[in-house]
Amino acid sequence: MTLEKVLIASYLTVLLTLALYGFHRSTLVYLYYRYKRNRPTPKSHFEELPWVTVQLPLFNEMYVAPRLLDAVAKLDWPRDRLEIQVLDDSTDETQELCKAKVAELAATGLDIQYIHRTDRTGFKAGALENGLRTSKGEFVLVFDADFLPNPTVLHDTVHFFTDDKVGMVQVRWGHVNRDYSQLTQVQALMLDGHFVIEHTARNRSGRFFNFNGTAGIWRRCAIDDAGGWSHDTLTEDMDLSYRAQLKGWRFVYLPDVVSDAELPVEMNSFKSQQFRWAKGSIQVAKKLLPTIMRSDVSWSVKSEAFFHLTNNFAYPLLLLLSILLLPNLLVRTRHGWREVLIIDLPLFFGTTLSIASFYITSQREIDRDGWQRTLKRLPLVMSLGIGLCINQTRAVVEAVFGRSSGEFVRTPKHGVRKRFEVWSAKKYRASKTIIPLVEVFFALYFALALVLAAVGGHWVSMPFLALFCLGFAYVGVLSLHQSR
């Protein structure tokens, strides 16, 4: 086989695999509309409200922890049925801030305890497990440091547990700083797609979905029955979710109940968050997919679990496609309609349109006029996804080969909400890597590809090449600039 045929065959194989994942995304949109009216309702209501433990896992969150404690103190729930655990593993000023705030709130009669660990074994999962040892609640509500829970969240969720088979109830994430920057606007779009379309489609169609680590409430015995919190993956929430559902526990998702949170405003922080989520999901796939496939759950549940847990393999495929694009331009001396139909249209329909329909649908469901604003941001959404592929490929490779991440890397939050608030002078920063330099190199690579495409008359390919160039340039340059 000639080099030309090998390149084209490799390119088509990668392209078609990516198109398959794109088709799956479109399937979720279909499932969303098909089961949209299957709104969950509580089986009944508790006559006597149950004990609830609120767990707040923290690590070095001095800018957001006090406001979280103030928000949790306003929860609308009987004080003789509410316990709050501040699970603080911090090593900086956050300790004293939290101790002072806990003492202030305890003086009002609130049952709130400050629990500090010097041994961070298990990181967040270890802190949650440690808190459960002394907890009083039949139900456990979890919030990360950057959240601002609505006072009514317990009344909105707890009554679903009148069904003895319900093990967890998850609410939708909102965004207090959605309009802070282009980066936060794009992140909000990405998360809205996950929470509005993916979670709703999976839950209402009877497929498995996952607790997101925060803004959700568990039945304590469901955690125990599933084997408890485990820290052998970076996404302990996803791991526990699948184990609990395999045990027969039913989950409920409430997209109309919203808990606001802060989005990362720094590109490097966003990338560290995405890295952790990607690596963790592949770790869970390695750990649990064989068990899921051998279980007696339906084929629809198994297939959805496969696509859900392996979805981040799309990033190495996208990186490989990036590498193959320029050689394909050089060997494809003809670019007529036959080549367009065979090679370029699958990319367009399998990926671009599926992404567009996915995010437009999610914004339309949140705000009827939102889809119009979404159209303007779609190129940046797609470019950001492309620009992340080097960072995410590293995460996937580390997970596949079992490389330990060492210290748990938290996502720095700065307590910024309004557009002109300054974060750059604040303490926390994501760690520096050489990844941004590689991303800038790929941006230059695609700038060259654009020139060659123009010279060779590959006009149909140029919009896609421009997306790749913009994506790598945006992610790489902003990462370097903000890390200065």
Image (cartoon, rainbow, N blue to C red):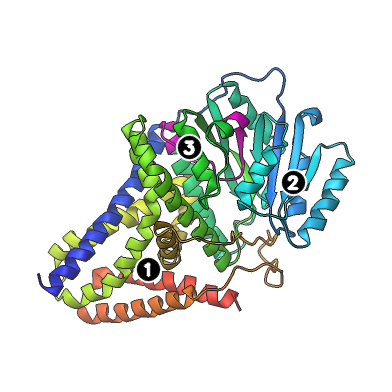
Q: For the image shown, how many numbered marks are present on the structure?
A: 3
Which residue in the structure is indicated by mark 3?
A: 243
Q: Nearer the viewer, residue 295 or 13?
A: 295
Residue 319, above or below 79 = below
Cα–Cα span, label 1 and label 2: 44 Å
Residue in the image at 80% along x and 28% along y: 80
Which residue in the structure is indicated by mark 2?
A: 86
Q: Nearer the viewer, residue 398 or 250?
A: 398
Q: As shown in the figure, which amino acid type bears the numbered disc 2? A: Val
| Magenta-colored stretch includes residue 149 | no
Residue in the image at 19% along x and 70% along y: 7
Which of pointers 2 and 3 indicates the residue nearer the eye? 3
> Residue 81's image quarter?
top right
Residue 325, above or below 356 = below
The image shows residue 476 at horizontal and vertical percentages of 48, 74
> Residue 225's image quarter?
top right
Q: Is residue 143 visible?
A: no
Q: As shown in the figure, which amino acid type bears the numbered disc 1? A: Leu
Q: Secondary structure at mark 1?
A: helix
Image quadrant where one finds the C terminus: bottom right
Task: Give left or right: position of 1 versus 47.
Answer: left
Which of pointers 1 and 2 indicates the residue nearer the eye? 2
- Residue farthest toward the left in the current orientation of the protein: 1
- The range drawn in magenta is 202-221
Task: Give left or right: position of 380 versus 413.
Answer: left
The image shows residue 261 at horizontal and vertical percentages of 64, 51
Q: Nearer the viewer, residue 130 or 444?
A: 130
N-term-proximal mark, 3 vs 1:
3
Residue 467 numbered mark, or none: 1
Q: As shown in the figure, which amino acid type bears the numbered disc 3? A: Arg
Cα–Cα span, label 3 and label 1: 39 Å
